[in-house]
Amino acid sequence: MKKNFTRPSLMSLVLVLLTHFVYAQTDSTEVASIYGFYSYSSSLMNASSAPELSIQGNASYTATGVQLTPASSGQFGGLFINGRTFTSVNGLHVEFEYDMKNGTPLSGTYGDGLSFFLYDGAITNPTIGSPGAGLGYAYNRAKDTYASLRKAGLSGGYLGIGLDEFGNFKSKRFQGDARVNGIAGVTWSQATSHVSLRGAMGAAINSNGLGTGFTGYPLLVTRSTLSNTGTVGLALQNDRSYLATSNTLTSVFDLRNNAGEFRKVYLDLIPHFITPTTTDGFDIKVDIQTTQGGTPVNVINYYHYKTSVPYTENANPQVTDFNTSDVEGSATNQTLNATVPSVLKLGFAASTGAAYQQHIIRNVKLTLPYAAVANDDVTSTCKLQPVNIPVFSNDIAYKGPISITTPPTGSNANIDYSTFSFTKSSDTDLTLYRKKVTAQGTWTYNKSTGIVTFNPSSGFTGTATMTYTIKGKTVKDSSGNIIEPYGDTAYRSVPGTITVNLKTTGCIYSVVSNRMVTQGVK
C-alpha cells in the first residue's frame, strides 16, 4: 500500500534548526552567590577517594555507604566531611539515609545509636567526642580509676543530633566511669529510641575535671519515637527546667528498622528572626521517613536553639575528678554561649557497647532551606530517535518570605527556566550549560519551553545519563532589599539525574526504499 508524504522545504528545515540552536544550545553565565554557600551531595558509596571525607575509629567505606560500626561490641567510628564548609547565615537543610541492623540486644534493646553533628568550620583537625552513650558528640569524665575513659566532646561542637536507639545520649550520669550532664530523675514511659539534640561545647569551669571540652553540650530537647502517651519527650526551658514536649507523632516507630530498609532523616535549621533583620539562633526541625516514598514523621518540631542557653551542669564531683572518690557534688547553673559559627562543617558518628548493631549512612545532601529541588527523571527511546523530557514536571522551587509560621510554598511554577544548567564542573563554575555532547548522544535544553532533548548517537546501545540543576526566582521590595532569595546561586538545587534507556521493542522506524517511504515496526 502506498503512503504519501509531504517533504519539508530546505528553508523550513533551516529555520527549525536555527530556532533550536538559539533556544537550546547557547550557554550563558550566572552571578556568584552573595551568601557564599554551595550545596553538597554524596552517595557515600565506595567513597574512599573523596578528598573532602575522612573517617575515624572503626568506620569503613563500603559499597552500600559508610559503615560507622560493624555489628559487634565495643565499636566506635566517625565520618567527617571536613573538606567542605557551609555558611550559616541562611540556615541549613540536611538529608541523609541510615540503617541500623543485625547485632545483639541487651535487655531487649540494641545499641547504641548514631549522631549527626555540626561543628565550627574553623576547626581543621576535628577530634570526635566520647564513645558509648556520647555517640561521638558529648564528653565523658571519670575518676582516676577509669582515667583511660575520659574523653572530651567533639572539638568545636555546635549541635549534635542523636538517633539514640539505646536511650542514654539524653541522660545525666555520675558514676566512677561515666560523668556527663543531662536529664535526671525522669520516669520515662519510653526511654529508648529517642531523637535527642545536644548543644554546643561549653567554657572551662574549673581545673578539677570541668575543663575545656568537658562542659556544655547540654541536652536541649528529646523525643521518643515509640509512643505518644506518657512522658515521651522533654525540652529545655529558659529557667533551666525541662518541660514536656507537645507534638504528637503521626505514626510511632522504632529508630531501628527491623525490615532492613534504609530510613531517611530530614533536618532543617531555620534562622529565628526576632526582627526583620535580626536573628537569634535557629528553629530546628527533624523529620524521619520510615518507608520508601512515605510521608516523613515530624519528631522534633522547630525547637528554638538560642545563641545563649541557660542550663545546669549537674554531674559534678564533690571535690575533683582526679581522685578515686565517687561522691557527687552540687549542680551549678551555667549559661552556654551558642553563638552560631560563621561557617560550619558536618559529620557523623556511631558507637556500640554490650548492646550492639551495625550502623550505616549514605546519600547525604546539604542545601539551604527552601533551595530548589531537582528530582530524577527516567524515560526511554528507540535507536536514533530523539526524545523530549519535561524535566520540571516533578521539580520544585519556592516562593514567599522565609518563615516557620507561614513557610514558603513549593511548586514547579516557581522555577526560573533561564537558570537551568547541565552538569557543572565545580561549585564555583558560573556557566549555565545548555548543551552537552557525550558518547551516548547530544543533550540540549530549550529555555523557552523547559524541555530537555536527548538525541542518541549511532553508537547508543544501553543507558545514557545526565545531571542538571535549577533555581527559583529572587524578589526584591521597592527599596531593593531581597525578600525572596531563591534566585541566588546558593539556592541552586542538588543535581537531579536524567536517565534515558534504549527500547528494544515497540519501535517504529522509517524505511527508505527506491523513493518509497514505509513504516517498519520492531
Image (cartoon, rainbow, N blue to C red):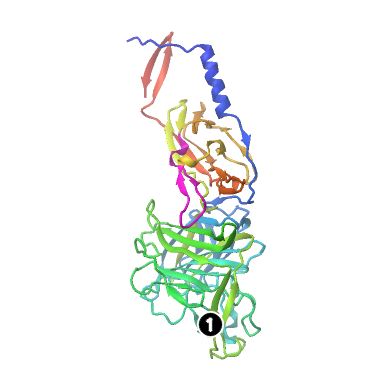
In the displayed image of the protein, which residue is found farthest to the front?
478
290 in magenta:
no
Q: Does the image show residue 80? A: no
Query: Residue 256's x, y, as percent?
Result: 40, 64
* Amino acid marked by disc 1: Asn
Answer few, some or many: residues within 10 Å of disc 1's Cα (few below 14, many 20 plus, some between 14 and 19).
many
480 and 447: which one is in front? 480
In the depicted structure, whether residue 407 falls above or below residue 196: above
Residue that label 1 marks: 314
403 in magenta:
yes
Q: Bounds of the magenta span?
A: 390-411
Q: How many numbered badges does the structure rendering display?
A: 1
The picture quadrant where one finds residue 262 is bottom left
371 and 79: which one is in front? 371
Left/right placement of residue 281 relative to residue 193 reads right
In the depicted structure, whether residue 136 falls above or below residue 84: below
Which image quarter is the N terminus in?
A: top left
Left/right placement of residue 503 relative to residue 440 reads left
Q: Does the image show residue 278? A: yes
Residue in the image at 55% along x and 32% along y = 439
Left/right placement of residue 232 relative to residue 417 reads left
Query: Residue 448's x, y, as percent?
Result: 52, 30
387 and 372: which one is in front? 372
Task: Say what secondary structure mark 1 lies in.
Answer: loop
195 and 418: which one is in front? 418
